[in-house]
């Protein structure tokens, strides 16, 4: 892993489709983008920020999310998620995250990721995998 500068930014776009709606999980919910999907777009933006700094065989995993979902977004809208590195502590990276639809900010918060060696990660996971 190369040194990740504070201020490094990532971005991710998602066009809201039927499978992204809260109502796709539970028909009693409104036909708007589900909160977990909004969080996923923010995580994708954070991962985008890290890609240029990771070495071969490394990946990042989420270690924390603190998010407010501020506004509903209907199907068909384009969502833009942004992430900015605000703290680096060894392999732990903290981000300020935000998401916007075509009209307004729809979410904000913080997100933590850790850089891991994928091979070692998979080895530690093996005892939990049932065969």
Image (cartoon, helix red, strand yellow):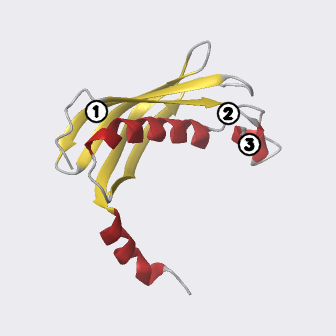
Spot occupied by residue 31 in the image (x, y as percentages of width and height): 78, 33
Spot occupied by residue 16 in the image (x, y as percentages of width and height): 69, 31
Residue 33 is labelled as: 2
Residue that protrudes farthest toward the top in the picture: 103
Q: Which residue is at a point 42% across and 83% down the rendered structure image?
A: 127
Does residue 118 sit above or below 131 in this rendering? above
CA gap between label 2 and label 1 equals: 25 Å
CA gap between label 3 and label 2 equals: 9 Å
Decide which of tag 2 and tag 1 comes sooner along the chain: 2
Q: Residues within 10 Å of mark 2 (few under 14, many from 20)?
A: many
Q: Which residue is mark 3?
A: 19
Residue 130 is labelled as: none
In the image shown, does 90 or 13 lie closer to the viewer? 13
Q: Which residue is mark 1?
A: 85
In the image shown, does 61 or 29 lie closer to the viewer? 61
> Which image quadrant is residue 117 in?
bottom left
Q: Which residue is at a point 54% across and 84% down the rendered structure image?
A: 130
Evaluate if marks 3 and 2 touch, with contact meaning CB atoms under 8 Å apart. Answer: no
Q: Which residue is at a point 72% across and 40% down the rendered structure image?
A: 22
Q: Residues within 10 Å of mark 3 (few under 14, many from 20)?
A: few
């Amino acid at each position: 892993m190369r040194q990740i500068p504070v201020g490094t930014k990532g971005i991710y776009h998602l066009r809201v489709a039927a499978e992204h709606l809260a109502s796709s999980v539970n028909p009693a919910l409104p036909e708007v983008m589900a909160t977990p999907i909004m969080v996923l777009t923010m995580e994708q933006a954070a991962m985008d920020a890290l890609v240029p700094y990771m070495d071969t065989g490394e990946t990042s995993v989420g270690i924390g999310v603190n998010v407010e979902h501020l506004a509903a977004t209907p199907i068909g809208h384009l969502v833009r998620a942004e992430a900015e590195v605000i703290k680096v502590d060894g392999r732990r990276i903290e981000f300020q995250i935000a998401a916007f639809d075509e009209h307004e900010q729809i979410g904000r918060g913080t997100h933590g990721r850790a850089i891991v060696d994928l091979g070692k990660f998979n080895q530690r996971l093996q005892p939990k995998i049932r065969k």
